[in-house]
Image (cartoon, helix red, strand yellow):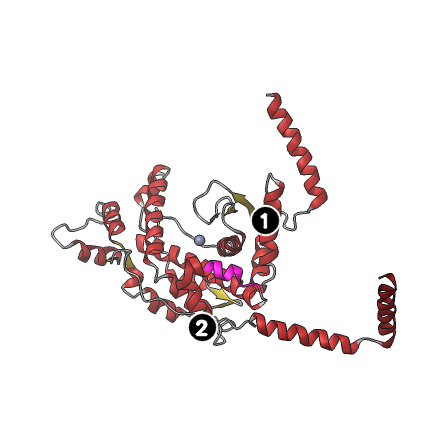
Amino acid sequence: MSEIIQSVFENQNTAGQIQDKIQPSYPFLVYEKHEDLQRLEEILGQIRQSKTGRQLIDDAEKHQTSICLDDGMRAYGAYDEVENHLKVNAKSDLNRQVGTMAHELRHAQQFQKGIIMDAYLDTPKTYIQNQSVIEADASATATAVCFELALNGNDKPLEALREKDAHIVNPFQNQAVKGGLNDGSAYQAAFKGWFSDYSTRDCYDILYIKMVRQRFKNCTREEEEKKFERVVPVNDIVQKVCLCQGKPYLSEKEADAFFSTQDACSVSFERFNNIFGNCYMKFNFDFSKPQEEVMKEKLGLCSRPHSGYMPAKIVPEPLPIPSVAERQVLAAEKIAAAKKEKTPAQNIIHEAVKRKIVAQK
Ligand SMILES: [Zn+2]
């Protein structure tokens, strides 16, 4: 017991020292240790160097989203829309945490726009497509933040993101260097890139099945009667959240075309069977027909190849940032220009100081 009390006092002392050292720049940070506050401030500080990032932080602050580090989580980060709480994995390195926090901040921003999603009430296709929209959009936005940082000379968060998400970062970059940062086409390329990674999509299909089970445990009788019925059109979600500089980066027509392709209506083979099992009673599936036919007809879903299938890799265009040699030339030019501008008075002082140094020697 005494040990506990002592540790409480120690923590209070540390808390006192923290206040002397560093003040949180964001009012809803949750932390216990000084290192955590420091790290959170480092991440926020980097994100604020990007215009898109500053907007994300401002919106989260208005929305009072709490932010913490978590050393017990397996994912890179998470946003809980019910609690309005954002977590970043404490064990990731700083560069990875910058991209992760930007991704999760985008989720916080998305849910301020009144998204409706419920794994148990929504039709499986609606839920899976809408889930993919918010994930692809959050990844595209995180890429935008890291890309802006790279243009400012800090390319480490972008490279950390590329290690994990080359299929999103490379299409974004290739479009951005062609001027696609302002017209939304870089966002659109990254968004579509998200769908090319079947292993990530499979993970979200698994998550969907888990969410259905979880909701089933606490659903009301009324909800049970209405399960898997609600249609939340994917285009509604796209037009609400997929924005670049306030404008949708996928038009209604583009989104309709994209989400009606067979690939965008597919789930992994294993989850296809899970969904069939969840829905066969509710929708009176006809067992005399082939499973694929029934699922397509009743739920608009088909199964896709195993996650081992991956499309061809996209090679990135070079980043439009100066190389080290170019930066050295620029710096030398700046120094030369600054020397020229010196007033005679400064030169006299400079000479005097020089003489003093010589005299001291
Ligand atoms: Zn996410």
Q: Residue furthest top?
A: 1
Label 1 secondary element: helix
Query: Residue 276, percent across and down?
Result: 23, 49
Q: Is residue 94 visible?
A: yes
Q: Nearer the viewer, residue 301 or 22?
A: 22
Q: Nearer the viewer, residue 13 or 184?
A: 13
Query: Residue 193, percent across and down?
Result: 38, 64
Quarter of the rendering containing residue 222: top left
Residue linked to disc 2: 317
Q: Label 2 is placed on what type of residue?
A: Glu
Residue linked to disc 1: 40
Where 72 falls versus 260 (above or below)? Answer: above
Quarter of the rendering containing residue 154: bottom right
Quarter that holds the C terminus: bottom right
Where 71 falls versus 243 (above or below)? Answer: above
Q: Label 1 is placed on what type of residue?
A: Leu
Work out how far the residue at label 2 is from the one at label 1, CA to CA, in angstroms: 32 Å
